[in-house]
Image (cartoon, rainbow, N blue to C red):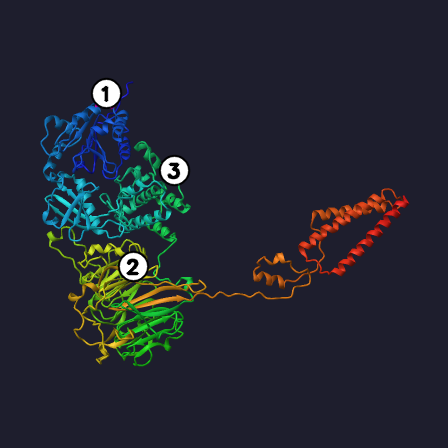
């Protein structure tokens, strides 16, 4: 029987840097398409060999002429160009073609068809070199201007091997401009504010720079009329999905527009490349902490997709993009699917995705669901750890076989068992045994070793610290101490408003001072206080939280009970009755357990243990989130969107921010200057559409677009606001007229640029943040305070801050002021409406700081003995231009020297020799030895030598007793016995020296002992002589 060899009709090698022709390739042709900017020649060879493993290749088409430089270039990252020089010498390009022709082409020869948009030099030389590469017959054909002109009959015949020629010819008009370097956009009215940078490494994507602010965006240009119905569906599907998704780890969708059959999608640009590119460049293992940081962000994005019933279906390292800060952005949703109830129950059917990452159930053609995305996550995590594909093989069937069996090499490298188990769980062949994305995220977050904390109260070194209160003069940058603060007090929390100040100490005592017209100090009267005074009514109540409004105060106890004092309309119990001069319980909140409280100037917010929010006070601008601007006198619960659980709350003068358990911020109230970051980014085509989406007032809680990491604190200023992220970075938004956003300029800042952190603090870990009127402050982990913005007084519509002489005015106008008197003390005085301060337009440019600048650094100076005290910047508080700085200090611990106790030495041993005096013995050891007691006891033989001697002595005694009737051998045995006894005495003396000090003795006793010993020896000799005489 004659074997039939299947011949591949045609193979087309094309890359993203060449003209886009993928939609016109025939189904019978094998298309090998790759990323021009990232693929190496080794990657291209592997991909080509894998795609042509089933049959020999008779026709090889090369569509690799670059759009911009017209060179025949295989790889952009390695600069691999096809030329007579690269083909003549032993280069990777020559090896690439020689290997392929030898391994994949039949003996009778191969046709290499090179498709050109523009003429190339040395075409004849290239053709001759190709023919001489191997012994096989090679025919080289150049198809010139195949894309821009009507082909000749010969060229049409060649094109028909690879392309749908009729469809290809329809492209020549619509894409002619894209084939020319520096081509102009088809929509000049939409792009005249943008500068085209290059055709990016994302197929049909073009990189643009906005001229106004330098921001970069990706425009994906899709020619609808060139696409089949299924391809059009994929394109429109991507637009639909992107417009619905909003997550910090997912590529942001900005806008879309269609004109003359061209669909243009504007998306976020991730300048860090892809995860695949990052892994390809690695030569050593990535640290586990970094792997888990990246993988947590990927999993977070996938969990968000699944929560919104979206299957990605093409998760792979090439679709994981990275920002300049190495944060994850999941992209490419072209083949994603919105899961219906039927999909969740029965699974999807269409087989899509990349072979290296598809799940076993997809290989078998079975229905699949979100667990297929989990399988892909397992492949990605494995690839990050091992720097190689999870399932790899010489051909596609081999790869599929390994996937079906779940066979992969063990994880190598310095990684924990937890990471290996995580991979194993995700790569289970049975979908039901794989964890969900939410479960994965929980496991990863619980395993995190380090978590960022804004407050450092848990630092054990500062348990016994004391606090000092200072007022920071913004104009002169001088710290003025508050002298009336109780000595050695430890401040737990400090809050102040335009009228008064509240302070909570570590022992849960509450102090108040300032204006007291409405009884907001809680002292039982209306008399003002110039120094901190204890609120006796709250003693023993276990107060753990405080908050200060302009004319009222809030207190929260450990039991979740909220107390209030001040003007009657802010009491939360209805507007009936009089002002409350002493703190009393808010009856409307008695049934709930309150954990957090906060106040603006005229409104109050409380959060309970279940994450529910209660509000009362002024509803102007929508700051209460009730849906109206009406005043609320009784605390009521408001509706939180998306079922979010609130954990914390921050209030500004006319707005409110709610923080959720997931680190997302909900905002309500005034959004003037976009200070709540609720304005949507104006897209690439906004001018053409003539649309605006600016938000002024928000009457109900609205989610703010997420940031790259969790929000841990929010500060709401009058004209601008900011967030402090878990990563320690600061993002600001709002007005920037005096450089208060820290971007290095005073231009109006685009809404989307707030996702770039303050550049001057990128290398710092910020712990505290404040937004004042025209300036910002940030404290870092190394005890440095940074300032940027204006140091001058800036006019406000509602508050005027100026130097005063204490002239009288109505109590209603009393505000917090900075006195510029010779004492430079912070005082409570009245203000007058004058025009003595500078309008915003007249602010001295010399008083403006455009970049974060250090204005305070805390260092501890060593004492004489070298010990240092501990110091830290514990808290910042700011309203308008008034700033309070709280500093904690711990004095150096005194070294306690224990003098050695002089005791009489026990008379159990002779005095220590002078040689031992040089040995340094710790005092506590000397004391222990001096106070130790000696116990007399009968010691049992412990040494083996001692036991042996005793046995031998007993034997000799027995022999002497048995020889009483004869003198034979008596003398020898007696000598042996004496020697054994002497030896035993020596051993016992050594043992006694090691355990019990020898008894004290003097010289007289020593002489007596010698005399006694000589007499015993003499007597022993006489006995021996007597024994010898008997013999």
Between 96 and 167, the one lying in front of the other is 96
SS state under label 2:
strand
Residue that mark 3 sits on: 409
Residue 824 x, y percent position in the rendering: 28, 73
Helix, strand or loop status at disc 1: loop
Q: Residue furthest top?
A: 1
> Residue at point 67% right, 54% down?
994
Q: Are marks 3 and 2 in contact (CB under 8 Å)?
A: no
Mark 3 to mark 1: distance in Å? Answer: 40 Å
Q: Secondary structure at mark 3?
A: loop
How many C-alpha atoms fall within 10 Å of the one at disc 2: few (<14), some, or many (≥20)?
A: many
Q: Nearer the viewer, residue 856 or 20?
A: 856
- Quadrant containing the N terminus is top left
Which callout, 1 or 2, points at the residue further toward the start of the chain? 1
Residue 316's x, y, as percent? 29, 42
Q: Quadrant of residue 170?
A: top left
Please report the bounds of the magenta region as a residue range. 131-137
Residue 737 x %, y %? 18, 62
Can you tell which mark lies on residue 757?
Answer: none
Specify the label residue 724 is tagged with. 2
134 in the magenta segment: yes
């Amino acid at each position: 029987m004659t074997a039939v060899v299947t011949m591949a009709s045609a193979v087309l090698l094309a890359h993203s840097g060449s003209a886009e022709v993928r939609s016109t390739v025939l189904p019978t042709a094998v298309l090998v398409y790759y990323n021009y900017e990232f693929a190496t020649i080794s990657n291209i060879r592997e991909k080509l060999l894998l795609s042509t493993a089933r049959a020999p290749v008779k026709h090889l088409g090369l569509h690799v002429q670059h759009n911009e430089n017209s060179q025949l270039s295989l790889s952009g990252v390695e600069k691999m160009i096809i030329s007579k020089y690269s083909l003549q010498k032993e280069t990777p390009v020559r090896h690439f073609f020689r290997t392929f022709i030898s391994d994949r082409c039949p003996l009778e020869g191969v046709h290499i068809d090179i498709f050109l948009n523009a003429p190339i030099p040395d075409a004849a030389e290239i053709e001759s070199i190709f023919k001489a590469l191997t012994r096989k017959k090679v025919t080289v054909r150049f198809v010139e201007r195949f894309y821009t002109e009507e082909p000749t009959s010969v060229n049409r015949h060649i094109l028909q091997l690879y392309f749908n020629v009729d469809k290809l010819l329809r492209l020549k008009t619509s894409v002619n401009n894209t084939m020319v370097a520096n081509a102009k956009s088809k929509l000049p009215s939409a792009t005249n504010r943008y500068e085209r940078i290059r055709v990016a490494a994302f197929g049909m994507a073009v990189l643009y720079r906005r001229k106004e602010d330098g921001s970069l965006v990706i425009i994906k240009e899709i020619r609808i009329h060139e696409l089949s119905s299924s391809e059009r569906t994929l394109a429109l599907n991507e637009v639909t999905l992107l417009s619905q998704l909003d997550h910090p780890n997912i590529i942001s969708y900005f806008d879309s527009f269609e004109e003359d059959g061209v669909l243009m999608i504007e998306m976020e640009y991730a300048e860090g490349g892809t995860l695949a590119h990052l892994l390809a460049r690695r030569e050593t293992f990535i640290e586990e902490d970094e792997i888990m940081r990246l993988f947590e962000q990927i999993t977070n994005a996938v969990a968000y997709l699944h929560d919104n019933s979206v299957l990605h279906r093409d998760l792979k390292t090439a679709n994981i993009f990275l920002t300049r800060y190495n944060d994850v952005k999941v992209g490419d949703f072209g083949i994603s699917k919105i899961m219906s109830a039927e999909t969740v129950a029965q699974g999807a059917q269409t087989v899509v995705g990349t072979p290296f990452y598809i799940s076993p159930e997809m290989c078998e053609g079975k229905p699949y669901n979100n667990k297929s995305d989990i399988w892909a996550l397992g492949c990605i995590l494995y690839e990050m750890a091992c720097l190689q594909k999870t399932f790899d093989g010489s051909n596609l069937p081999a790869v599929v076989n390994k996937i079906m069996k779940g066979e992969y090499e063990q994880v190598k490298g310095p990684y924990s068992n937890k990471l290996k188990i995580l991979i194993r769980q995700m790569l289970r062949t049975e979908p039901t045994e794989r964890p969900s994305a939410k479960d994965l995220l929980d496991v990863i977050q619980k395993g995190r070793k380090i978590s960022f904390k804004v407050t450092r109260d848990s630092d054990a070194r500062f348990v016994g610290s004391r606090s000092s209160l200072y007022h920071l003069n913004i104009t002169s940058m001088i710290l003025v101490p508050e002298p009336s603060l109780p000595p050695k007090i430890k401040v737990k929390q400090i809050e102040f408003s335009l009228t008064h100040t509240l302070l909570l100490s570590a022992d849960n005592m509450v102090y108040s001072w300032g204006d007291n017209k409405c009884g907001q100090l809680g002292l039982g009267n209306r008399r003002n206080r110039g120094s901190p005074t204890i609120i006796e009514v709250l003693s023993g109540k276990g107060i753990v939280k405080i908050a200060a409004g302009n004319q009222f105060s809030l207190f929260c106890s450990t039991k979740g009970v909220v107390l209030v004092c001040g003007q009657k309309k802010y009491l939360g119990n209805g507007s009936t009755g009089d002002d409350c001069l002493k703190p009393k319980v808010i009856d409307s909140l008695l049934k709930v357990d309150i954990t957090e409280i906060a106040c603006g100037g005229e409104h109050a917010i409380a959060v309970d243990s279940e994450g529910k929010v209660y509000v009362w006070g002024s509803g102007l601008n929508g700051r209460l989130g009730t849906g109206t601007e009406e005043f609320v006198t009784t605390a009521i619960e408001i509706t939180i969107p998306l079922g979010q659980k609130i954990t914390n709350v921050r209030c500004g003068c006319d707005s409110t921010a709610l923080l959720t358990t997931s680190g997302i911020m909900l905002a309500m109230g005034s959004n003037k200057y976009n200070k709540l970051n609720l304005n949507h980014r104006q897209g690439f085509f906004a001018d053409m559409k003539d649309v605006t989406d600016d938000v002024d007032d928000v009457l109900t809680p609205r989610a703010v677009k997420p940031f790259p990491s969790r929000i841990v604190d929010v500060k709401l200023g009058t004209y601008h606001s900011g967030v402090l992220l878990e990563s320690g970075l600061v993002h600001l938004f709002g007005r920037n007229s005096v450089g208060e956003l820290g971007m290095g300029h005073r231009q109006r800042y685009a809404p989307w640029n707030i996702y770039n952190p303050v550049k001057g603090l990128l290398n710092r870990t910020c712990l505290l943040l404040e937004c004042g009127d025209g300036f910002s402050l940030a404290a870092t982990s190394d005890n440095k305070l940074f300032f940027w913005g204006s140091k001058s007084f800036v006019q406000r519509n509602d508050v005027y801050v100026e130097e005063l002489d204490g002239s009288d005015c109505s109590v209603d106008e009393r505000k917090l002021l900075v006195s510029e008197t010779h004492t430079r003390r912070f005082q409570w005085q009245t203000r007058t409406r004058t025009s003595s301060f500078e309008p915003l337009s007249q602010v001295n440019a010399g008083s403006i700081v455009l970049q974060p600048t250090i204005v305070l650094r805390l260092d501890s100076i060593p004492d004489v003995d070298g010990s240092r005290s501990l110091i830290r910047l514990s808290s910042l508080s700011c309203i308008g231009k008034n700033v309070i700085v709280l500093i904690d200090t711990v004095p150096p611990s005194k070294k306690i020297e224990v003098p050695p106790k002089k005791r009489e030495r026990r008379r159990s041993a002779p005095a220590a020799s002078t040689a031992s005096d040089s040995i340094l013995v710790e005092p506590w050891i000397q004391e222990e030895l001096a106070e130790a007691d000696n116990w007399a006891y009968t010691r049992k033989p412990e040494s083996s030598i001692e036991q042996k001697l005793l046995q031998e002595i007993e034997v000799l005694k027995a022999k002497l007793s048995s020889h009483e009737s004869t003198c034979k051998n008596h003398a020898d045995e007696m000598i042996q016995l004496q020697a054994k006894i002497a030896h035993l005495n020596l051993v016992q003396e050594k043992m006694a020296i090691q355990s019990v000090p020898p008894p004290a003795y003097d010289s007289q006793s020593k002489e007596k002992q010698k005399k006694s010993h000589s007499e015993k020896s003499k007597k022993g000799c006489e006995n021996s002589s007597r024994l010898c005489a008997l013999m």
